[in-house]
Image (cartoon, grey):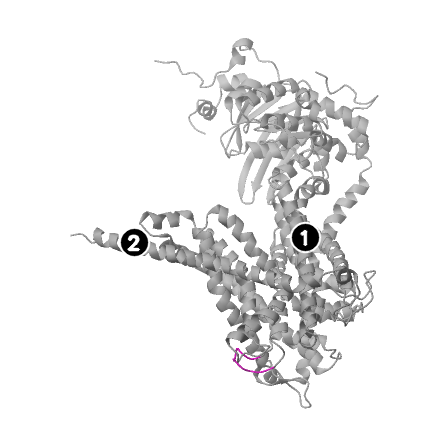
Amino acid sequence: MTTKSEPITKNLSTKELIQTNKSKKSLKKLFEKIIPAILFLFAVVTVLTTLAILYTLITEAVHFFQRVSFTEFFTSTNLKPLSQNPSFGILPLLSGTLLSTVIAMIVAGPIGLMAAIYLSEYASDRIRKWLKPMLEVLAGIPTIVYGFFAFTFVTPLLRSIWPEIEATNILSPGIVMGIMIIPMVASLSEDAMTSVPKSMREGAYALGATRLETAMKVVIPAAISGIVASFVLAISRAIGETMIVTIASGSTKNFSLDITESMQTMTAYIVEVSSGDAAAGTTIYYSIYAVALTLFAMTFLMNLLARKIARRFREEY
Amino acid sequence: MKYIDHSQVKKKINSRLRLNSFLKYIFLGATLFGLVVLVILLARVISQGLSWIDWNFLTGHLSMDPEKAGIMGAVLGTFWLMLVVIFFTLILGMGAAIYLELYAKKNRFHSFIQTNIANLAGVPSIVYGILGLTVFVRFMDLGSNILAGGLTLSLLVLPIVIVSSQEALRSVPQAMGEASYGLGASKWQTIQNIILPAALPSILTGSILALSRAIGETAPLVVLGIPALLIPFPGGIMDRFTALPMQIYYWTLDASLVAEYANLAAASIIILLLMLFVLNSAAILIRNKFQHRF
Amino acid sequence: MAVKSPLYAVPKMETKGPELKPMNDTIFETNSLNLWYGETQALKNVDLPIPEKSISAIIGPSGCGKSTFLKTLNRMVELIPSVQTTGEIKYKDTNILSKDYSAEALRTEVGMVFQKPNPFPKSIYDNIAYGPRIHGIKKKSILDEIVEKSLRDAYIWDEVKDRLKENAFGLSGGQQQRLCIARCLAIEPEVILMDEPTSALDPISTTKVEELVQTLKEDYSIVIVTHNMQQAARISDQTAFFLNGEVVEFGQTEKLFTKPSDQRTEDYINGRFG
């Protein structure tokens, strides 16, 4: 065995080499200090993004509310931004958003939950390994493609069944949005259900319960807050969804709950106004900030709520 | 006396089992429903658009005339966007993730940043569009160019990249870092030589998936004022541009004026989906190749 | 009536007899070392001189602070947030716990081998060359020499010389651990700290590692934490017994295992607790 005192090169041992190199290290020390500082700034970019969103939305919305009163904005059922005597009530947009979201959840809620039950309680590991990624493909399709599908396929299909439906209507994008959200509900609910301890299921099986009874009476009640959180997140997603409703629901600003009619959502209004060359400084230009602020506040609260519920669920297990 | 009549239970058990297996198929049907729609959607798009894809369509300039219209400009615009997005999200996302996972003290400021990132991930994409319009297009006076679009989309997917990079860094065993520290390596040497290379495949997978989310986004671009009909090809990040989703959007809207536009939209969707397919396959390949290494 | 005998055989004792050789000069000396993880105190007033060029074993039940103590010797405990220390650790008469003493410099002289083999996801060659490289040795010819010498010193050269470019994960657990020892030798430390280095290995690999450790004491000062008392008795020159963060007894291994001076040590080596 060679001993370590034996020189590794002509006249220096490794240790001596390391020692000589150490004296040149002051630059490296500086480097060690600067890098975390730079990386910290990168992390701060996310905070700046939030601040920038809040700042732009609020300052521009303030301009809007200097011209249009709070009460008019939140209580008027008239939205006529381009008329001689313009009025800016958000209620028509809220009704459109609400309606499309409700329709989407009527589709995504039950179907997503049933899929979650199948995936977590019935499917074998092998089937689940295939089905889950396939479902996620559905979530990966760009929304513009769903918009195209709603407008050129689902609407004509619906009209062939139900002729009163207009060429642009809120029903078709609502349904398609629901289909788009199915994977989200299914996957998040399934996560909640699979995190219910196995021992609970075994307890039910040992008493002679069927899979269905176990799922309905044991697993779902135990996972209910996780499931509710997934629904809330899905609602938030539906409220913020833009392209499907913009394309397939038209731009009629009616305060109504008639699903056969064309209706505009908050998001579609922002698209219409911002792509319509509204000159900066006009009331109609500022109105998109007021609408966007409302939209931001709604989705923010929904997300907050979902996280609160989900956290409570995690504490349980 | 007996509280449970076993003969009654036996009689009932058959109907309970029947209900169980009946609903099993209902649940399976619900799971497959989405897939059926996916198949219909793809079949529809392909049957409508495939015949319109030819050499002229792939390489030509945009045109009002559906017979002459080509998609090259929009494809190039999307590629340029990808470059900008991958550049900014990788640097910012990886950097922020390294800071949050490996440097930051786990105090209240840290949890504030984490909560903030979670919130940002839930902000609707159109709000990012308004942010980009106000800050990049107007305030920084970039106009509706590739840089403004790319920066907007970068901010949009940054939370996703940060969160997935953090998970990737967290999955590197601590023992590896310890081994490096034990040899006298400094913190940055350890990160640069050991932790980051080990986490890189997962970071890339997450970033590519985020990238594919970004290039499908339409709403922020519409708000930024990306033009409908732009004839010249973009040659640099300061050029004005159009992108594939934008083209699909305008052609779909105008299909009520010129029916063939719907077919062009379908053809463009095929191209967009192909690009997404390639990106996602790359992500999956990277993930599978480097999975279970430690 | 059976005569009470130690549960663990101490083969060395019979050959060397009661005559104990004197300890070497100390390389490490701790004075009133205290350590807290947040509120809980893990080390209490530890005063321990560790002699150079010999093997010192640290034994004790789980959670007694033996691993914590080992990791303070190269300041690896600092990686855990909320750790606080008082007292001093003198390495070659300098207090390494002082702020100006760089942990990186310390760790180039005090190497460490871990409980589980933890090679890097790199080739065998790059694993060994990692240490020299981060300390600025870049020349290929020198690195080649260091790699070969370290692997030879760790008695693993013959097993891996034909596959130096292969990933280190392809080696068996025992080979990986000897690779990790070689990786540690590559920066020529003065001291090697070993944290239960054989606990994840099979008996044959354990024997090989133990033999290797025995040969290394010619050139290195070795501190080994183990909960295998037979191992401590087999390979170490002196042993410290830790209990609840305190040093109960420290002395020549033969003496500690045959004539412990503290009742608690006797209880422990006779298997009454822990």
Name above or below for residue B96 compared with residue C38.
Answer: below
Q: CA distance from mark 1 to mark 2?
A: 50 Å
Type of the residue with mark 2: Asn
Label 1 CA crowd tier, 10 Å (few <14, some 14–19, many 20+): some
Say which residue label 1 marks.
B279
Q: What span is colored magenta in the figure?
A: A253-261
Q: Nearer the viewer, residue C169 or A26?
A: C169
Q: Chain of mark 1?
A: B
In-image side of A64 versus A139 (left or right): right
Name above or below for residue A8 compared with residue C100.
Answer: above
**Number of the front mark, 1 or 2:** 2
Query: Is residue B4 at least partly visible in the picture?
Result: no
Q: Residue A145 in the image: state x and y as whole percent.
A: 63, 65
In-image side of C170 versus A198 (left or right): right
Q: Quadrant for the C terminus of chain C, please.
A: top left
Q: Residue B91 in the image: state x and y as whole percent.
A: 73, 52
Q: Which mark is residue C62?
A: none
